[in-house]
Each structure stands twice: as C-alpha cells, then as structure tokens.
C-alpha cells in the first residue's frame, strides 16, 4: 500500500513539475519576443532632417542619423509647391533611385538638395532607406519661411 501511495504522489509531483516547466517555457518565449521588439526599435537608424538653408533655387538640408547603426539611402521623392502639399501628392512623385546607396553612419550628416521656385511655400521630401534587409521610410512636409532662416514651420513629419 505504501509503495502505491508513494508512486501516486510521485506521479502527481512529476505532473506538477511538467506543468511548471511548460509555464516557464511560455514565459521565456514571451520575454524573448518582447526583447526582440525592443532591439528592433533601438538598434536601427533614426534619420531626421535639420539645418535647412536656401541656396538660390534649392533648399539644402542635412539628414542626421540619430540611430545606432548605419543606413543606406535607397530612393527619394520630393516636391515643391506654392500651395499646401498632401502626403498622397508627395508619395505620387517620381522616385529617384540611389544605386549603390549613400551610407549615413550613426551621428553623421548627409547633405540633401531639393529644387524649388521663388514663389514655392511648401516642400515635401520622402526618403526610403535600408539597414540590413529592413527598409524604412522618413518624410516631411514643411512650410518655407520667406525670411533668411529658411524653413521654420513643420506641417507634418513621419518615420516608418
């Protein structure tokens, strides 16, 4: 009788151990998924446009990579207009492919130029860039201030 009782208790403890192991495996898997999401959002390039200046009929600005890994420029689109620009209009502009892709390393600036006319008040810019096999998108639509400061008012800015 004692040996059957011992065997039954042993089987119950093994069952509890198996359940505990399964629960532990589930929580480790869940934590690894969360860690991967955190790495994907931090170990990536983060491009931002700054230092806008007018240069005759061009708008010159710098893209700065504020991320921790380099980015390679894949393509760009741009538009300048006297009337307000929508994101749809910007996305429908012809693509300029950047073969070989200029590299923008962390904390490095990459100079960009966009053509515009004297009466243009809005500028839109869309950049596709890659890091490894993952492709990202950064864009903005800004209102050009006619004074010497260049661009001051941000209408829209996004990054995917």
Image (cartoon, rainbow, N blue to C red):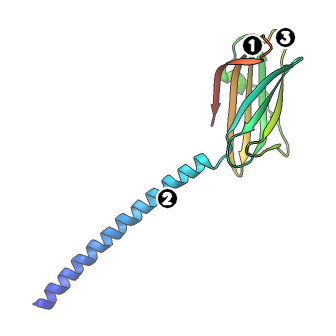
Q: Nearer the viewer, residue 136 or 68?
A: 68
49 shown above or below 67? above
- Cα–Cα span, label 3 and label 1: 11 Å
- Cα–Cα span, label 3 and label 2: 54 Å
* Relative to 61, 35 lies left or right: left
Residue at 71% in and 27% down: 91
> Which quadrant would residue 145 be assigned to in this image?
top right
Neighbor class of circle 3 (other Cα within 10 Å; few <14, some 14-19, many 20+) is few
* Relative to 70, 41 lies left or right: left
| Quadrant placement of the C terminus | top right
For marks 3 and 1, the one nearer the N-term is 3
Residue at 82% in and 31% down: 112
> Which quadrant would residue 109 be assigned to in this image?
top right
Where is mark 3, residue-wise? 118
Tell which tag, 3 or 1, sits nearer the viewer. 1
Where is mark 1, residue-wise? 145
41 shown above or below 62? below
Query: Are dots 3 and 1 in contact, CB under 8 Å?
Result: no
Residue 45: mark in rendering: none
For marks 2 and 1, the one nearer the N-term is 2
Where is mark 2, residue-wise? 32
The secondary element bearing badge 3 is classed as loop
The secondary element bearing badge 1 is classed as loop
Neighbor class of circle 1 (other Cα within 10 Å; few <14, some 14-19, many 20+) is few
- Residue 123 percent across, percent down from the top left: 75, 20
- Cα–Cα span, label 2 and label 1: 48 Å
- Residue 159 percent across, percent down from the top left: 64, 34
- Residue 114 percent across, percent down from the top left: 83, 24
């Amino acid at each position: 009788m004692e040996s059957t009782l011992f065997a039954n208790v042993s089987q119950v403890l093994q069952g509890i151990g198996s359940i505990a192991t399964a629960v532990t495996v589930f929580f480790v898997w869940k934590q690894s998924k969360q860690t991967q999401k955190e790495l994907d959002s931090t170990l990536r390039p983060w491009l931002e446009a700054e230092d806008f200046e007018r240069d005759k009929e061009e708008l010159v600005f710098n893209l700065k990579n504020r991320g921790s890994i380099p980015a390679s420029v894949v393509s760009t689109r741009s538009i300048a207009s006297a009337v307000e620009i929508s994101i749809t209009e910007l996305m429908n502009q012809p693509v300029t492919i950047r073969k070989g892709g200029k590299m923008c390393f962390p904390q490095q600036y990459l100079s960009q130029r966009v053509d515009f006319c004297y009466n243009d008040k809005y500028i839109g810019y869309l950049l596709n860039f890659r890091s490894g096999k993952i492709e990202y998108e950064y864009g903005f639509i800004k209102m050009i201030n006619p004074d010497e400061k260049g661009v001051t008012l941000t209408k829209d800015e996004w990054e995917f």
